[in-house]
Image: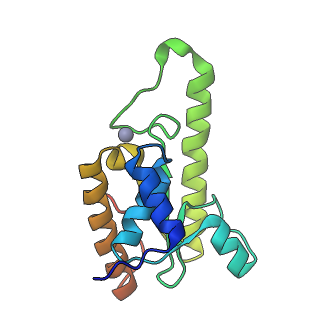
Amino acid sequence: MTDTMTPEQRHLAMAHNRGRTRPELALAAALWHHGLRYLTNDGYKNRYHRKLPGQPDIIFPRERTVVFVDGCFWHGCPQCDKNPGKSGDFWRDKISANIERDRKMTACLEEANWAVIRIPEHEIKTKAALAHTAECLKSAIIETHASTVGTDGRP
Ligand SMILES: [Zn+2]
């Protein structure tokens, strides 16, 4: 495939190579590189003049699929489980509230017939993990488009 990156995407990709970008931008750049075309939350707002619940990081309007990148700490990733017991209840409550909100937003979107994919940050932390996740997402999105809605993107 020819290089079809826009200057903006190239910038994102380069920022990722320097390791200074936010994880969701790294994932966005990887997906773009795989030939997937999406909107960001702002892009969606501008085009459709409405917002989606929970402000997804990456939106595929045609496939009716949204992708969230969840920071492992803030979203209480069970695999990383870095909940700081010693920091007391404040963080724990905050994280519980986040998990609860994630659940509500997912339900809300699914009710509106969107497929919701949540990617824990650790799945895109390294270059290898990022490449693997981008591959999985690509097939998930292509499958979603072809058949049903409702994958959560996790094995
Ligand atoms: Zn994690």
Residue 18 at x, y = what percent? Answer: 41, 46
Q: Quadrant of residue 89?
A: top right
| Quarter of the rendering occupied by the N terminus | bottom left
Q: Residue at x 70, y 72 (%)?
A: 45
**Residue at the right extreme, as displayed:** 49
* Closest to the observer, 95 or 14: 14
User: In which quadrant of this rendering is ligand 1 seen?
Assistant: top left
Residue 95 at x, y = what percent? Answer: 56, 34
**Residue at the top extreme, as displayed:** 86
Q: Is residue 86 above or below residue 54?
A: above
Residue 117 visible at all: no
Residue 101 at x, y = what percent? Answer: 61, 48
* Closest to the observer, 76 or 46: 46
Q: Give the side of residue 13 with respect to residue 51, left or right.
A: left
Tally of numbered tags: 0
Q: Residue at x 58, y 72 (%)?
A: 111
Q: Residue at x 58, y 25 (%)?
A: 91
Looking at the picture, the colour scheme in use is rainbow
Q: Quadrant of residue 32?
A: bottom left
Q: Is residue 113 above or below residue 25?
A: below
Residue 64 at x, y = what percent? Answer: 51, 79
| Quarter of the rendering occupied by the C terminus | bottom left
Q: Is residue 111 above or below residue 83?
A: below
Q: Give the side of residue 34 with respect to residue 37, left or right.
A: left
Q: Is residue 73 above or below residue 124?
A: above
Residue 128 visible at all: yes
Q: Residue at x 60, y 55 (%)?
A: 104
